[in-house]
């Protein structure tokens, strides 16, 4: 089920609600595109860079892990770069679309919980993610996640179009 586009003219209770609404929208667009692709298209690449749609969803799950849990919360994470092998995106061959989408949904739920329980101006906890730099505010982290999702939703639109599947707006 696709989340409706959060129109700028629709009232929102807070800036946090705006961020979460747009993140939900772009996640739903990605899920819709992935569910419409046949298995061969999910595991194959139509692009010179070689990434696959399953690798993309694994990457987005790890992006949220890196920026929210490892970054903003400053928690230790066993494999923050678990979406990469040899400097490229990676997903194990036995991982299924449902499994990857469930992981994405769980990560999204955690992001929502964190965003709703902290002020946007709150600065993240120091940790490995920041590599010695000052931690970012929650607002900057959510903005970064939003641009990641929007950019990659556009990438997936191109792949879906090449595969004969549905595309976005």
Image: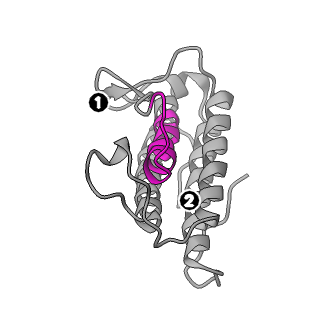
Q: Is residue 47 magenta?
A: no
The answer to whether residue 8 is left or right of residue 152 is right
Residue 53 in picture, x, y percent from top left = 49, 33
Label 1 environment density (alpha carbons within 10 Å; few <14, some 14–19, many ≥20): few
User: Residue under circle 2?
Assistant: 23
- The numbered disc on residue 140 is none
- Could you tell me what secondary structure mostly forms the magenta stretch? helix
Q: Earlier in the sequence, mark 2 or mark 1?
A: 2
Q: Looking at the picture, tell me which residue is in the foreground, 157 or 16.
A: 16
Q: What residue is rendered at 33% in x and 27% in y?
A: 88
- Chain part drawn in magenta: 56-79
Question: Is 165 drawn above or below residue 142 in the view shown?
Answer: above
Distance from disc 2 to disc 1, alpha carbons, whole Å, reads 28 Å
Dot 1 falls on a residue whose secondary structure is: loop
Quarter of image, res 143 = bottom left
Dot 2 falls on a residue whose secondary structure is: helix
Label 2 environment density (alpha carbons within 10 Å; few <14, some 14–19, many ≥20): many
Q: Nearer the viewer, mark 2 or mark 1?
A: 2
Question: Is 84 drawn above or below residue 70 in the view shown?
Answer: above
Q: How many marks?
A: 2
User: Residue under circle 1?
Assistant: 48
């Amino acid at each position: 089920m696709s989340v409706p586009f959060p129109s700028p003219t629709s009232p929102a209770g807070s800036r946090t609600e705006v961020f979460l609404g747009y993140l939900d929208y772009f996640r739903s667009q990605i899920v819709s595109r992935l569910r419409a692709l046949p298995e061969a298209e999910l595991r194959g690449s139509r692009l010179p860079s070689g990434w696959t749609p399953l690798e993309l969803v694994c990457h987005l799950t790890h992006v949220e892990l890196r920026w929210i849990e490892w970054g903003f919360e400053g928690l230790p994470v066993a494999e923050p770069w678990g979406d990469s092998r040899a400097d490229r995106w990676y997903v194990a061959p036995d991982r299924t679309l449902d499994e990857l989408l469930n992981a994405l949904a769980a990560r999204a739920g955690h992001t929502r919980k964190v965003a709703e329980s902290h002020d946007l101006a709150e600065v993240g906890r120091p940790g490995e993610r920041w590599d010695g730099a000052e931690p970012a505010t929650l607002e900057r982290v959510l903005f970064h996640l939003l641009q990641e999702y929007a950019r990659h939703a556009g990438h997936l639109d191109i792949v879906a179009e090449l595969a004969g599947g549905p595309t976005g707006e």
